Image (spheres, rainbow, N blue to C red):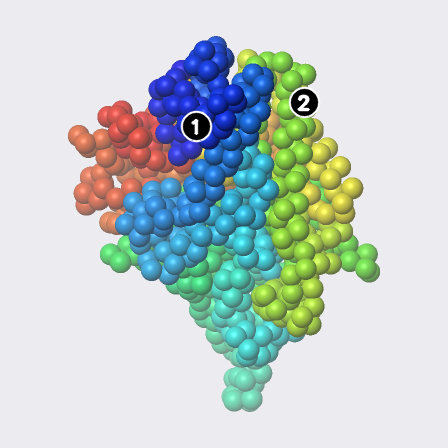
């Protein structure tokens, strides 16, 4: 039998430690209350007879307490309990020293790989992480109920973003950029008036993004269509100026041509401003803003033509990339792009198909944009089409006092995720036990989510003026509480979930892509959704079911469960759980069937859902990509492509990256071995999860890919 210690390490069960602990407690009580050697042996044997492959050290201590109580040694049991409590207090006094020191020594790999836009070597980022470690420690020890902290530690659930919980800030949002540009805003105590032209509007927008990102965690999304009017203003300004300067000297046609040329120059400069500002600005937590640009050409938009020009230019500049220190064009991580497919641009002869063809080329080379089907989204969201938030979660439809739908200026309060496979492991195929345990753990998730909600209630607008006073979310007065934006479904609060595939395998012995497995998986999903709907009805808070990528959590849950329950075939033995409702990467399924299958689950996970497919060597398969994009429009709400051809970001080599004798990726042109500066197609098995070094450094998987 193995014992899992509090630090996660696993040791052999040592029966003598139980005897020593009880004998120490014996010394603190009267002789008649002491346990005899025979009674101590009886307790030890009862623990051994549990016959479990692994036990938490806390579980063993619980068994000892229960054994002493059964023997009638109440005073001794009390002494033992007090001793445990005292030791727990000692352990809780400071749990951050080693994590902070390992961060400063650049030895904390988990933090180093947590975010693509955070570099843990940089001082400002380290400062944010140090503060985060302190916040996480205070959250676990003091702010959260002990049962929630224990559930988090044991992998029952995951309390997201505990490193920011001590502050009254929220997760993701849709910035109300239209209001801020049209009506002006304030930053750093300075008034910013409505811009008169496109390039100034782009500059102001990026400054707003940086300010917003510095006062929340998670991502921000911006709808680019609000820039169209400012591009027209630039054109009108140029036209008016040319008429004043050359009236009578140039014809109207000549003036118009010059004005359009100047507008095109300003368009290029403005979009370049957006791209370079976002990638060079540092927020106060030491990272680039986690921002998404929403590219949606709406038929009823009075500035549709200008916005078509803006979207086209954004895609052109993303396709080109940004130069690195070697002068090679590379793919920037931000801004993320989300492109909306509609009747006029879904590659079926529409007016703006040429922009979608550019988007497909961009996807093939740069992985962006993601795609939203306006057709499917209208079906799922009461006829509305709107951006996901930076974290890829979606808001529920909400109407203001005038009956108008509103999405921009809304946000997500936070996330708690449920470990589905762990419920299946414990239930061992018993459905009655499974559903009972599911409801128990959903109640824990509800209580954890309410901790997030209650922590925000009573917050004053002064905590982040850019959000609450100057338009990103609201226009409140100083000292006014934000409470009304936390209630009545204005903002969302999300229940995430991991491992639908694995829990189906555990309970039914088959994948959720089979008829039997799908029936069970849909019941699980509908049960989760029903819980969220019930909580929303009872509280008026916008609970939502959230099924979007959380790759690091897929590994955390799997690692914890392997430590607790051992290696389970096709579950814990893989080292990861499949995220949310997704089809496991090892299943043989074509892109179209995958979209058809996952679209049913997207409808249930209305609080956030994305699906992805692998298209090998995408730059050489543009026609295949176009076929998939057409299919997305008709069949699934939100999708992305997740692989591309091998590509070295150092020298620009566009060909197959080799694996050298040391089992490392190596560019055959320049010899680059830095995995962070190359893109590698997963050629062997199509694995699409997080890349990491195998702890045992076995030769077969020493490279930074799980299945080499």
Q: Which residue is drawn at the image coordinates 47% and 48% (left, top)?
A: 137
Which x, y percent locates residue 450? 66, 45
- Whether residue 213 can be seen here: yes
Q: Is residue 273 left or right of residue 593?
A: left
* Mark 1: secondary structure: loop
Distance from disc 2 to disc 1, alpha carbons, whole Å, reads 43 Å
Residue 562 image point, x, y percent: 43, 24
Q: Is residue 554 visible?
A: no
Residue extending farthest to the right is 402
Q: How many marks?
A: 2
Closer-to-camera residue (210/538) = 538
- For image coordinates 50% across by 68% down, the residue present is 207
Relative to the observer, which residue lies in front, 336 or 528?
528
**Is the residue 656 above or below the residue 420 in the image?**
below
Residue under circle 2?
A: 436
Residue nearer the viewer, 44 or 525: 44
Whether 697 is drawn above or below 305: the answer is above
Mark 2 or 1: the one toward you: 1
At 24% from the left edge and 56% from the top edge, which residue is drawn?
326
Local SS, label 2: helix
Upstream in sequence: badge 2 or badge 1:
1
- On the image, which quarter does residue 440 sit in? top right
Question: Percent x, y for residue 679?
Answer: 33, 41
- Badge 2 density bin: few <14, some 14–19, many ≥20, Cα 10 Å: few
The 10 Å Cα crowd at callout 1, few under 14, some 14 to 19, many 20 or more, is few
387 horizontally vs 254: left or right:
right
Q: Quadrant of the C terminus?
A: top left
Residue 280 % position (x, y): 39, 63
Residue annotated with mark 1: 27
Q: Residue at x 39, y 34 (%)?
A: 7
């Amino acid at each position: 039998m193995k014992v899992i210690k509090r630090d996660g390490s696993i040791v052999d069960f040592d029966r003598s430690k139980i005897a020593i602990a009880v004998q120490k407690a014996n010394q603190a009580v009267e002789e008649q209350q002491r346990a005899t050697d025979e009674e101590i042996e009886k307790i030890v044997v009862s623990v051994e007879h549990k016959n479990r492959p692994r036990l938490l050290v806390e579980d063993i201590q619980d068994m000892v307490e229960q054994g002493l109580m059964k023997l009638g040694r109440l005073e001794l049991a009390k002494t033992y309990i007090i001793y445990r409590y005292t030791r727990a207090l000692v352990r809780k006094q400071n749990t951050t020293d080693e994590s902070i020191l390992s961060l400063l020594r650049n030895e904390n790999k988990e933090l180093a790989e947590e975010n693509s836009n955070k570099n843990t070597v940089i001082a400002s980022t380290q400062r944010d992480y140090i503060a985060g470690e302190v916040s996480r420690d205070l959250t676990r020890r003091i702010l959260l109920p002990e049962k929630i902290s224990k559930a988090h530690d044991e992998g029952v659930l995951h309390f997201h973003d505990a490193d920011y919980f001590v502050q009254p800030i929220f997760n993701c949002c849709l910035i109300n950029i239209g209001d801020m540009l049209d009506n002006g805003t304030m930053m750093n105590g300075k008034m910013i008036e409505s811009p008169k032209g496109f390039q100034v509007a782009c500059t102001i927008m990026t400054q707003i993004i940086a300010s917003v990102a510095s006062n929340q965690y998670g991502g921000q999304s911006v709808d680019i269509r609000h820039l169209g009017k400012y591009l027209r203003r630039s054109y009108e300004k140029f036209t008016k100026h040319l008429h004043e300067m050359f009236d009578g000297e140039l014809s109207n046609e000549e003036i118009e041509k010059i004005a359009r040329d100047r507008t095109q120059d300003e368009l290029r400069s403005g979009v370049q401003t957006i791209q370079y500002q976002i990638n060079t600005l540092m927020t106060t937590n030491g990272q680039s803003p986690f921002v998404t640009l929403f590219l949606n050409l709406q038929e009823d938009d009075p500035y549709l033509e200008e916005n078509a020009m803006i979207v086209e230019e954004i895609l052109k500049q993303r396709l080109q990339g940004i130069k690195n220190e070697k002068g090679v064009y590379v793919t920037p991580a931000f801004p993320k792009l989300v492109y909306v497919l509609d009747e006029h641009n879904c590659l079926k002869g529409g007016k703006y198909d040429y922009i979608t063809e550019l988007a497909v080329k961009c996807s093939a080379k740069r992985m962006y944009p993601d795609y939203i089907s306006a057709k499917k989204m209208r079906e799922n969201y009461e006829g509305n089409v709107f951006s996901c938030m930076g974290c890829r979660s979606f808001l529920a439809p909400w109407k203001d006092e005038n009956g108008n739908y509103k999405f921009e200026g809304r946000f997500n309060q936070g996330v708690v995720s449920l470990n589905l496979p762990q419920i299946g492991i414990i239930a061992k195929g018993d459905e009655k036990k499974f559903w009972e345990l599911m409801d128990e753990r959903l109640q824990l998730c509800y209580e954890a989510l309410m901790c997030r909600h209650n922590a925000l209630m009573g917050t004053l607008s002064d905590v982040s003026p850019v959000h609450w006073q100057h338009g990103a979310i609201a226009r409140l007065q100083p000292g006014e509480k934000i409470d009304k934006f936390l209630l009545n479904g204005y903002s969302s609060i999300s229940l995430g979930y991991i491992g639908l595939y694995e829990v189906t395998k555990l309970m039914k012995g088959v994948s959720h892509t089979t008829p039997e497995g799908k029936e069970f998986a849909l019941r699980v999903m509908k049960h989760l959704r029903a819980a969220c709907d019930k909580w929303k009805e009872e509280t008026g808070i916008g609970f939502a079911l959230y099924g979007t990528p959380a790759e690091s959590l897929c590994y955390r849950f799997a690692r914890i469960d392997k430590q607790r329950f051992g290696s389970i075939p096709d579950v814990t033995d893989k080292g990861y759980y499949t995220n949310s409702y997704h089809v496991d990467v090892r299943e043989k399924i074509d892109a179209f069937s995958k979209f058809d299958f996952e679209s049913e689950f997207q409808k249930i996970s209305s609080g956030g859902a994305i699906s992805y497919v692998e298209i090998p060597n995408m730059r050489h398969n543009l026609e295949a990509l176009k076929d998939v994009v057409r299919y997305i429009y008709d069949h699934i709400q939100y999708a992305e492509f997740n692989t591309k051809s091998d590509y070295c970001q150092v020298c620009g080599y566009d060909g197959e990256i080799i694996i050298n004798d040391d089992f490392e990726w190596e560019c055959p042109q320049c010899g680059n071995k830095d995995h962070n500066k190359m893109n590698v197609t997963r050629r062997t098995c199509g694995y699409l999860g997080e890349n990491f070094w195998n702890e045992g450094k076995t030769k077969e998987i020493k490279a930074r890919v799980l299945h080499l």
